[in-house]
Image (tube, grey):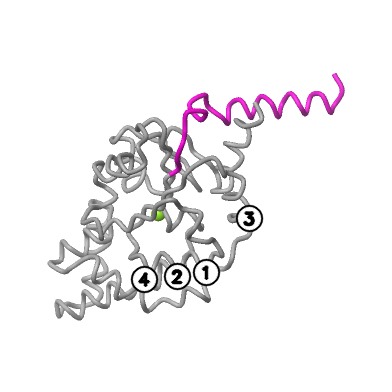
Amino acid sequence: MDEQAAGTLLEQASHTEFSPSWISEIRALGWDLDGTLYRDVPEIRERMEGQVLTTISERLGQDLAWVKKEYRQRLRKIGSNTKVIGSFGLDGPEVVDLSFDQIPFEQLLRPDPKLKRMFASLPNLRHVLITHNRIDQARRKLACLGLPESVFTLVVPVYDWEMSKQDPSLYRKVLELLTIRPHQMLYLGDREAVDILPAREAGLRTGMVWGDSSAADISLPTVYDVGELFQVTSEK
Ligand SMILES: [Mg+2]
């Protein structure tokens, strides 16, 4: 076998593995925003955390170092930032919003033409953005990334629905709106507790991006690999 033929075979083998049979059943993709449509930007996370901790410390009249230590311990147990803020007796979404507005996203998030091309390569799927961001915050980030909001059939700012991403009924409601069955939707996120497990509980297919999750149906090294996953299917 010549080198080229061997290469093609290898490529086919990896594609087979890469694209499970259930992919052909998928009609819609659900997308988390932060850490999914763009890879975690440490500076954003650090600035957000700094703002949140300062706000908690000021509101409770507690020492910042104590708040920091306590916050991290609780976050390990609870998993969701808004819920941790709530555990201090404060309004989680309100504190997150306040901190969010202080972050210069326009300087920290850059346009991503590769992401835009990936969405353009998936015209036969409906896309739903499911986020803990307020709608104006989500729009601001999409604008920074250069991704038009119009690529999404539906944008779900979960707090406006008075729900949380950790609530499996959120995903059932999205399925109802799209009039599709659970196995026809693939939900993509970057955190197991917040994205993968609740969507899985609702019966959706799940994909972890920018990392690995044994709980997800598929794990992809980057968000761009989602495009490849469906490209392979359409070539079959
Ligand atoms: Mg995320």
Q: Is residue 107 shown above or below 236? A: below
User: What is the magenta range?
Assistant: 1-29
Which image quarter holds the C terminus? top right
> Residue 36 location in percent, x, y?
47, 53
Name the residue at the top extreme. 1
Residue named by callout 1: 144
SS class, disc 4: helix
> Residue 198 location in percent, x, y?
29, 41
1 or 4: tag closer to the N-terminus: 4
Name the residue located 57 percent from the left edge and 44 percent from the top edge.
Answer: 123
Is residue 165 rendered magenta in the image? no
1 or 3: tag closer to the N-terminus: 3
Residue named by callout 2: 140
User: In which image quadrant can residue 161 be found?
Assistant: bottom left
SS class, disc 1: helix
Cβ atoms under marks 1 and 2 closer than 8 Å: yes
> Residue 207 location in percent, x, y?
45, 39
Ligand 1 location (quadrant): bottom left
Residue named by callout 4: 48
Amino acid type, callout 1 = Cys
SS class, disc 3: helix
Amino acid type, callout 2 = Arg
**CB of mark 3 near ligand 1 (< 8 Å):** no
Mark 3–mark 2 Cα distance, whole angstroms, equals 19 Å
Residue named by callout 3: 114
Circle 1: is it few (<14), some (14-19), or many (20+) Cα within 10 Å?
some
3 or 2: tag closer to the N-terminus: 3
